[in-house]
Amino acid sequence: MKDTSETSAAPYHAQQQARSAPYKEDVREPGIPFAEFVAIIAMIMALNALAIDVMLPALPAIGDALNIIEDNDRQLVLLSYLIGFGGAQLFFGPVTDAVGRRKVLVGGLALYSLASVAAIFSTDLEQLLIARVVQGIGCAAARVTALSVVRDCYSGRRMGKVMSLVMMVFMSVPIIAPSIGQAILLVAGWHWIFAMLLFAGVAMMLWSAMRLPETLTAERRRPMVVAKIVSAYKTALTTRVSVGYTFGTAFIFGGLFSFLAMSQQIFVDIFGLGKLFPVVFAAIALTMAGSSFLNAQLVEAIGMRRLSHVAALVYTLLGLVIFVQSSLGYENFWLFLGLATLIMTSFGFMGANFNAMAMEPLGAIAGTASSVIGTISTLGGAILGYVMGQFFDGTTQPLGLAYTVYGLCAIGCILFAEGGRMFHAMDRQTPQG
């Protein structure tokens, strides 16, 4: 295992600086205004959140229409998408490193749009789940490419700031997505939700094709040679910092996906919010967006490690509070809302930073690296979330357990990545190629 942890030894820092120099020459500005660049990347990433969160109010209607007997089985509509999204990223990484970013990006958005058409005309659960898997595959191509483009253009804390701004928009989508889904259901059937996803996919495909330049020049591309692909995967899976923060991301996503899987049942079945569910969900999502924005303002001054490590501790401790109070039979809406909001706020300080720290040492294989990181974090998080979601028993105890256990696992991953330390402020990493 290659150890890229930071130490205080001067010779080691000198070695780090020497090894970092060659790749920094490859970092280049995207060639379009910074604000537009962030907006394009953020909206591409937001397609993923939109495809998940807009479905939440529609799960009961889909269950009734497609004769889904067990309420917990409605979660398959979310899981099928996440399986396609998580699993396919492993394939698209080497492809985008070999052929460039634009072709894979536009192709992925086209596939996302076509799958939305298939979902519109689905008449049974099997057809819908297949369409959702394909929709996830298309979004996987877009996600891998988007992260690769960011790494092509930025590095270090600057990349952390870009990712924080991207995550701010990404986190803003859940604020409005359930309300959009609910509004559509008030005037039309659930099929029209997929018509909205079709419109979003086509819009982003056209915007990206017209404005986002190719950021991987021909001389920096890596031919799709099996030995080189295997070598790139090996590098991504043996670089200590990247492995630690990749699996750490999977665990915090496990908590997030547990919340997504159970949120409709918690707020509607336990607390009886009914149609107010999208409003409360939006309030929680708003805090995630706010913390992502705050992270973007603080990360260059304070550092990714200090911010994200503190957030991991908060995330875990508050999850334990939810677990304990629910175990004692005390279910209070306002207490749960406050705790869940603070937990999601802490997520805003972890997601972008964990991702940036996992990507930082792997700039020379950015496409493959983002695919490995995306596959492990998304697919792993989806499976963890689905497993805990199946334990939903009419209380918030399973969600509290998810936050606690997965949070402790994420802290363990941090300690692994950093050689047993936390809160170290220096972000210099060793590039691998």
Image (cartoon, helix red, strand yellow):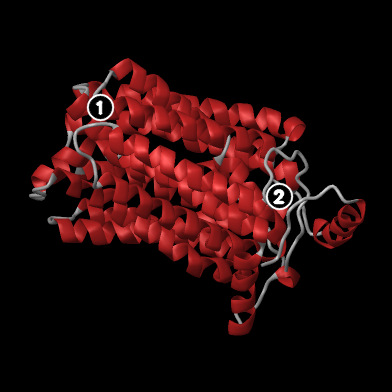
Instruction: Give the quadrant of residue 269.
Output: top left
Q: Amino acid at mark 2?
A: Pro
Vertical comparison of 186 with 44: above or below: above
Residue 61: give its label.
none
Looking at the image, is 278 positioned above or below residue 135?
above
According to the image, label 1 marks what residue?
267
Query: Where does the N terminus fall, quadrant-wise?
Result: bottom right
Q: Give the secondary structure at mark 2.
A: loop
Mark 1 to mark 2 CA distance (whole Å): 43 Å
Position of residue 244 in the picture relative to residue 76 (left or right): right
Q: Amino acid at mark 1?
A: Phe
Residue placed most toward the observer, 429 or 413 = 413
Residue 48, compared with residue 118, is above or below; it is above
Quadrant assignment, res 159: top right
Residue 113 visible? The answer is no
Residue 30, disc: 2
Q: Quadrant of residue 114?
A: bottom left
In this view, the residue in front, 266 or 87, is 266
How far across and down, in percent of the image, does residue 165 sit?
A: 61, 35
On-image quarter of the C terminus: bottom right
Q: Earlier in the sequence, mark 1 or mark 2?
A: 2
- Is residue 246 found left or right of 216 in the rendered image? left
Label 2: how many Cα within 10 Å (few below 14, some 14–19, many 20+) = some
Would residue 15 appear left or right of 202 to someone viewing this image? right
| Residue 346 sits above or below residue 248 on the image | above
Label 1 secondary element: helix
Q: Categorize mark 1 by other alpha carbons within 10 Å: few (<14), some (14-19), many (20+).
A: many
Q: Residue furthest top?
A: 334
The x and y percentages for residue 226 are 58, 83
Residue in the image at 19% along x and 38% along y:
393
Residue drawn 16% across and 56% down? 125
